[in-house]
């Protein structure tokens, strides 16, 4: 899908913001170099040259891919069977369940044709590059500032080798298409069948904006992906997937997942030992309220770019099952909103946006590192609290509060010569 950089609602110059003062060329180059170093280090880790290490998220992607070629991928959706395969293939076991929809099995099957180290390097390197290119298209001159804001999420995702960059790139391409009114925005939206719960916000936005052609393309794309998975894996894969989804729900309710890595309100409440039913009810209210911001923005005639950005962030608040690496979507939403936020936000509000974003993205990495040290010493992991859960609703509310405000007079005067986003 052909894309173009999104026009900002205003032109420069103006006094540098907190984000822009931090995003010097030296800092940006250093951060990008650090990501390369982490990727190369993790690649070396997967070769086994650094000694035995615990299984990681990418290991389970590779194991599931190998199970596709073995013909027993349906067993991946049943944790006891998956643990046996983990032991058989790696000599280790860990709580790394498999709950992805069948179309994603085709992706990991392609990765499994390579050794795990090369598969990690190829998957993480290419999806990171694609994600950053999409963000650059959206953010334009604000990309360096965006990189600063999103750096903890980038680090956690390259460290674990998960698919956050892939889903972030797909949602970003969808947003580019929606802003420019293209029906082909439905192509990447349909490919989000691999993680459909993360696409709810954007899908609701497209529905509310009456993008029927886009939604039709998305439905056809998702249907074709499902049909291909059925053809390759067999129809029995779907009952196995549904049983796996039920098993995952039960495990989530039982608190078996690493809640400190999760970013939902549900996870935060469960980490405080509140009953699962109460946490789920609060999660439902949060989801409805977040999506309500999107509908309210449309009703009030908010510029299209802002509506779509709010929808992406709101989509992170829908599902109880969301991890820190899924915050790549926050980067897409922020890329859409950052020009307008920086023209309206006070220095304190800018600091709050940056700080809350950093804590939400980096908390799981820090907590996980602390827990690993204690486990290695034979002690119980001390950090169980899921902290980001309440921060994301606060971030969405703060964005809404700032965007409702009129631009500073100087910015408003300049905007008259560049009315592109206001006219959308």
Image: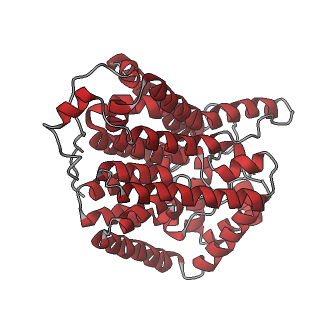
Say if residue 43 shows up in the picture.
no
In the image, residue 401 above or below residue 256:
above
Residue occupying the far left of the picture? 417
Q: Residue at x 74, y 49 (%)?
A: 269
Taking depth in this image into account, of 280 and 423 the one nearest to the observer is: 423
Quarter of the image where one finds residue 81 = bottom right
421 lies left or right of 380: left
381 lies left or right of 145: right
Taking depth in this image into account, of 87 and 263 the one nearest to the observer is: 263
Quarter of the image where one finds residue 143 = top left
Horizontal and vertical percent for residue 54?
70, 41
83 lies left or right of 348: right
Say if residue 329 shows up in the picture.
yes
Horizontal and vertical percent for residue 300?
35, 55
Taking depth in this image into account, of 411 and 11 the one nearest to the observer is: 411
In the image, residue 271 above or below residue 374:
below
**Quadrant (top left, top right, bottom left, bottom right) of the N terminus:** bottom left
Horizontal and vertical percent for residue 162?
54, 48
Horizontal and vertical percent for residue 420?
18, 46
In the image, residue 164 above or below residue 375:
below
Residue occupying the far right of the picture? 379
Residue occupying the far bottom of the picture? 235
Looking at the rendered structure, the number of numbered marks drawn on it comes to 0
Q: Residue at x 20, y 51 (%)?
A: 423
Q: Residue at x 49, y 58 (%)?
A: 291
């Amino acid at each position: 899908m052909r894309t173009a950089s999104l026009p900002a609602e205003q032109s420069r110059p103006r006094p540098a913001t907190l984000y822009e003062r931090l995003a010097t060329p030296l800092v940006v180059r250093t951060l990008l170099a650090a990501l390369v170093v982490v990727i190369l280090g993790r690649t070396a880790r997967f070769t086994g040259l650094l000694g035995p290490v615990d299984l990681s998220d990418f290991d389970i992607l590779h194991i599931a891919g190998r199970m596709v070629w073995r013909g027993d991928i349906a067993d991946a959706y049943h944790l006891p069977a998956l643990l046996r395969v983990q032991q058989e293939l790696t000599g280790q076991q860990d709580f790394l369940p498999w709950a992805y929809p069948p179309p994603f099995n085709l992706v990991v099957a392609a990765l499994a044709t390579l050794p795990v180290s090369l598969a990690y390097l190829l998957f993480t390197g290419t999806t990171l590059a694609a994600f950053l290119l999409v963000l650059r298209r959206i953010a334009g001159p604000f990309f360096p500032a965006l990189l600063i804001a999103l750096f903890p999420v980038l680090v956690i995702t390259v460290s674990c080798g998960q698919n956050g960059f892939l889903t972030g790139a797909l949602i970003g391409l969808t947003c580019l298409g929606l802003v420019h009114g293209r029906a082909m925005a439905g192509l990447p939206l349909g490919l989000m069948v691999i993680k459909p719960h993360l696409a709810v916000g954007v899908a609701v936005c497209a529905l509310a904006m009456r993008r029927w052609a886009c939604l039709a393309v998305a439905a056809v794309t998702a249907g074709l992906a499902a049909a291909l998975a059925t053809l390759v894996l067999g129809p029995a894969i779907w009952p196995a997937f549904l049983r796996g989804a039920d098993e995952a729900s039960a495990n989530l309710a039982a608190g078996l997942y690493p809640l400190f890595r999760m970013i939902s309100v549900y996870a935060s409440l469960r980490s405080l030992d509140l009953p699962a039913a109460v946490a789920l009810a609060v999660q439902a209210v949060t989801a409805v309220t977040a999506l309500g911001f999107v509908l309210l923005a449309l009703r009030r005639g908010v510029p299209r770019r802002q509506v779509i950005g709010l929808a992406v962030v709101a989509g992170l608040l829908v599902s109880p099952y969301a991890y820190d690496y899924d915050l790549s979507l926050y980067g897409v939403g922020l890329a859409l909103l950052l020009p307008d936020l920086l023209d309206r936000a006070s220095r304190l509000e800018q600091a709050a946006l940056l700080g809350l974003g950093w804590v939400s993205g980096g908390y799981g990495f820090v907590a996980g590192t602390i827990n690993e040290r204690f486990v290695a010493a034979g002690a119980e992991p001390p950090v169980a609290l899921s902290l980001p859960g309440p921060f994301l609703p606060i971030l969405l509310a703060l964005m809404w509060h700032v965007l409702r405000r009129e631009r500073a007079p100087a910015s408003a005067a300049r905007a008259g010569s560049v009315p592109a986003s206001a006219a959308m």
